[in-house]
Image: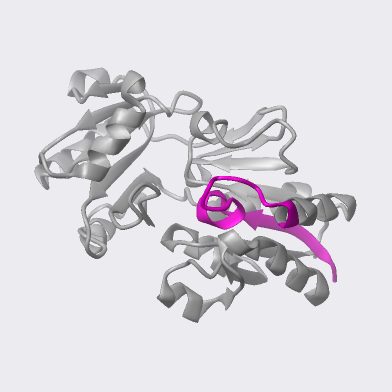
Amino acid sequence: MHLGIVVSDLDGTLLDSRHQLSPANRSALLELGRRGVVRVVATGRTLFSALRVLSEDFPIDFLVCSSGAAICRWPSRELLKAEHMSAPAALRLAGVLGARGLDFMLHHAVPDNHRCLFHRTTSSNSDFERRLALYASHMRPFNMEQITGPMCQAVVIQPPPGPGCYPALLRELAEFSVLRATSPFDGASTWIEVFPTGVCKSAAARWLQREQAAAGSLSLAVGNDYNDVDLLDWADLGCVVGNAPAELCARYHRVATHDASGFSEAVQLALAHG
């Protein structure tokens, strides 16, 4: 059997700490292309945000945005698949988060899901304020009356330490897909992302494997954080870069850090395995 699809997280995995693609990682992606392997980036970023760090010649075939809520062909940006929650579901979700006194952002539907409604409860959530400032021109204060159509997701931001209310929300929001991630800003706050049921990186990867990869071929996934766990579990070979949390490094095959081109090491392993 041969390698048919490679799916990698972006920030902290494929890109280094300067948000650059190393020569070694670029060479690995180009080699995969020459071998006819389907190359996928699966990121928590929206398409709007991903375009800040991905050039048109970035050597991939597909881009999975918002942790699986959208799948685009690359570099055309053709939207192949998008998921959303209904307005009534979004209202129920906002009610639960508001009742818990959480700071959250509710994103509009794809492809406008860089636009958000924000709900602020506390005044000491620096990571939340940082995200507000970064996307200030796309943020509006939360108002129930503004939810008149489908929405993409909610993002709850909680200061460190630990997973915050993630375990409780996982139980309380059983009709949604609830994912945990570490903040890409301070590297310590917890982001809890709430999507329509079934949305996750592995679901998008599974769909692309079925639609684009050779039948019966092997899969590689490379990640660095908790929101990559379902993706790593899906793949025939799941690798984490050395800068991943210790518990993930103990659970999956560990390669070099993102600053030492760990992705290229994972590709070499997968090609040898295949």
Residue name at image x 69 percent, y 68 percent: 266
Q: Which residues are magenta?
A: 1-24
Q: Is residue 255 magenta-colored?
A: no
Percent position of residue 131, x then y: 31, 36
Point out the image quarter for the C terminus.
Answer: bottom right
Residue name at image x 25 percent, y 63 percent: 167
Comparing 18 with 70, the one in front is 18
Percent position of residue 271, x then y: 81, 69
Residue 92 located left or right of residue 273:
left
Q: How is the image coloured?
A: one colour
Determine if residue 77 is in view.
yes
Determine if residue 37 is in view.
no
Comparing 112 with 255, the one in front is 255
The quadrant where residue 166 appears: bottom left
Residue name at image x 39 percent, y 44 percent: 195
Percent position of residue 126, x then y: 21, 43
Q: Is residue 4 magenta-colored?
A: yes
Point out the image quarter for the N terminus.
Answer: bottom right
Comparing 76 with 183, the one in front is 183
Residue 266 located left or right of residue 83:
right
